Image (tube, helix red, strand yellow):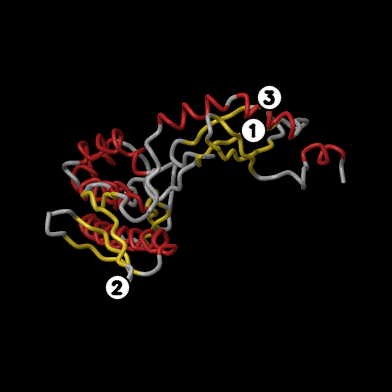
Amino acid sequence: MAQRTLLYRRPSEPQAIEIVFDRSIYLVRLRRHRQARRYTLRIQSATREVVLTIPPRGTMKEAREFAQKHGGWIAARLDRLPKAAPFADGVVVPLRGVPHRIFHCRAVRGTVWTEIAADGTHLLCVAGRAPHIDRRIGDFLRREAKRDLEAASMVYAKELGVRVERVAVRDQSSRWGSCSTSGVLSFSWRLILAPSTVLKYLAAHEVAHLVEMNHSVRFWRLVQQLCPDHERAKVWLDVHGTDLHRYGLPDATRDLF
């Protein structure tokens, strides 16, 4: 094996470390990069993940010391982000823009459904054991997202006379949707959390790409034709889009006491 390769290979290194600051524990993912010149920390706002990049010749001892030294910075940056909202009993989650409180129905058979309580509260009911709440709510939201996105995409595709090969939903953090030349449309499932007008705008946006694989004037004319209210939907995403990524995420910290 070439000596250069040996410089970067650390098979026994952990994938993450924990640091303590102000009686809280923070998980820090480690990333060794051959082009890094120094230790650097960054926080991915969509996933709330703390990432420490290590230079080729860096050591775990130095990495731990660097992360611990910047514990205050990590805590402050995470505190400025929207709070994580895991899928758990009592947590309020938007569904098509309407707040729903997760309600665990322990003694009821079934999976996930919606109800309106006597006081008008919208409920997202989930049956089964408590450890299954997160998975069942996540699966339900993905199914609902795919159903709504498929329906909207097919309507817009028919209007433009184009064919959608397939609609896929993923947990994309860098973009809300994409379109391939083969006619496959991919979307973030988190669009089901936004108002329906926002989801429909993204469907119109990607369907328009089946005609114009660019963002030319002609492309935006097609979007305007399909979704006259698209400007308002774009503004909503700019203002509230980042907040959608906090739902279903576990809390990045835990208390020592």
Q: Which residue is mark 2?
A: 108
Q: Identify the residue at horizontal 21%, vertical 50% (top origin).
A: 196
Across and down, in percent, residue 218 comes to 27, 40
Q: Which mark is residue 96?
A: none
Who is closer to the viewer here, 132 or 7? 132
Q: Identify the residue at horizontal 43%, vertical 31% (top origin).
A: 79
Across and down, in percent, residue 121 comes to 17, 53
* Mark toward the start of the polypeptide (2 vs 3): 3
Who is closer to the viewer here, 170 or 224? 170
Task: Name the quadrant containing residue 9.
Answer: top right
CA separation, marks 2 and 3? 55 Å
Across and down, in percent, residue 6 comes to 83, 41
Disc 3 is placed on an element classified as loop
The amino acid beneath tag 3 is: Arg
Who is closer to the viewer here, 18 or 153? 18
Disc 2 is placed on an element classified as loop
Circle 2 Cα neighbour tier, 10 Å, few/some/many (<14 / 14–19 / ≥20): few
The amino acid beneath tag 2 is: Val
Task: Name the quadrant containing residue 176.
Answer: top left
* Mark toward the start of the polypeptide (1 vs 3): 3
Mark 2 touching mark 3, by CB under 8 A? no
